[in-house]
Image: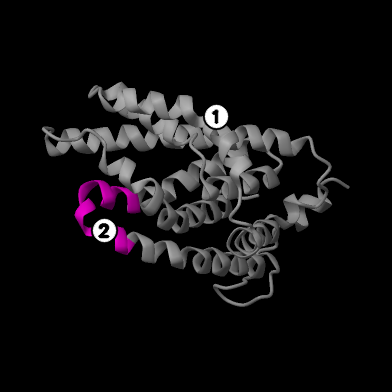
Amino acid sequence: MEWSHLFEIGFLMGLLGSVHCIGMCGPLVMALPLSNKTNLQKWGALFLYHFGKICSYSLLGVLLGLFGSQLPLYGVQENLSIVMGSIMVLYVVYVFIIKSKKTTGGKVFFNFLYTPIVKKLADLFNQRNNASYYLIGILNGLLPCGMVYLALTSALATQDVIQGGLLMAFFGLGTIPALIMVAMGGQYFGVVFRRKLQRLLPIFIFSMGLLLILRGMNLGIPYVSPRLGVGIDKITCHN
């Protein structure tokens, strides 16, 4: 799969996911110890934070891509856009329509799994050195998040170590703009505003899922489903 297509899918997923990030990660970003720092130091700290988070996402993408390469998912690579779009549509249907609110067992498991991460984050917030911002980003990337799981499922579908890592790196890049705005002007993103964005999230994800499916179908529709010829060469070169 071409890098440009991976960037397009990963970055757009991250950009849409940033709607979710504002609600979930926004408070964490606004809590970063940036007070008493110059503007240059603040930008440096934010860079380290996001770089750490992208490192976590990329590593997870590499692992999922490696795991996917061992699965007998024939034909997935050639139809990756359709697969990713279908995953997004199914995600919306399952999470926002089907899934029961009673998930006590899962919460207990996740609390047990992520409690050490949360405790370490609390320790790092009391530090103000450059390494702490980078480590906060790394640990933040490991916290439970539905949008990250969705992106990781797409990384699994790439069935490739490099592509899986790149897709997750581009996903991380897509989340940056919204979180930068939150960090630099958190007062403009109140609780009410974040809740409104959260309600729109399933619509955004579902719409992008449909768009990816259409793009993968190569229907010849300009901008929506152009004929890319993706997959034809990959199939014939193995003959």
Q: Position of residue 184 (x, y in %)?
A: 21, 48
Q: Residue at x 55, y 69 (%)?
A: 207
In the shown orientation, is residue 100 left or right of residue 52? right
Q: Is residue 179 magenta?
A: yes
As displayed, is residue 79 above or below residue 239? Answer: below
Q: What is the three-letter code of the residue carrying label 1? A: Phe
Q: Residue at x 53, y 45 (%)?
A: 148
Residue 227 appears anywhere in the view: no
100 and 61: which is toward the camera = 100
Return the residue nearer the eye: 4 or 130.
130
Side of 161 where 20 appears, left or right: left
Numbered disc 1: secondary structure: helix
**Quarter holding residue 44:** top left
Q: From the viewer's perspective, is residue 13 above or below residue 141? A: below
Residue labelled with disc 2: 190
Q: Residue at x 55, y 29 (%)?
A: 112
Crowding at mark 1 (Cα within 10 Å: few <14, some 14-19, many 20+): few
Q: Which residues are magenta?
A: 178-193
Query: Quarter of the image holding residue 61?
Result: top right
**Colouring scheme applied when the structure was drawn:** one colour
Across and down, in percent, residue 190 comes to 26, 58
Residue type beneath disc 2? Gly
Q: Main secondary structure of the magenta part?
A: helix
Residues under labels 2 and 1: Cα distance? 30 Å
Look at the image and tell me whether residue 209 can be seen.
yes
Query: Residue under circle 1?
Result: 112
- From the viewer's side, name the closer residue of 1 and 62: 62
| Marks 2 and 1 close (CB-CB < 8 Å) | no
Please tell me which residue lies in front, 234 or 55.
55
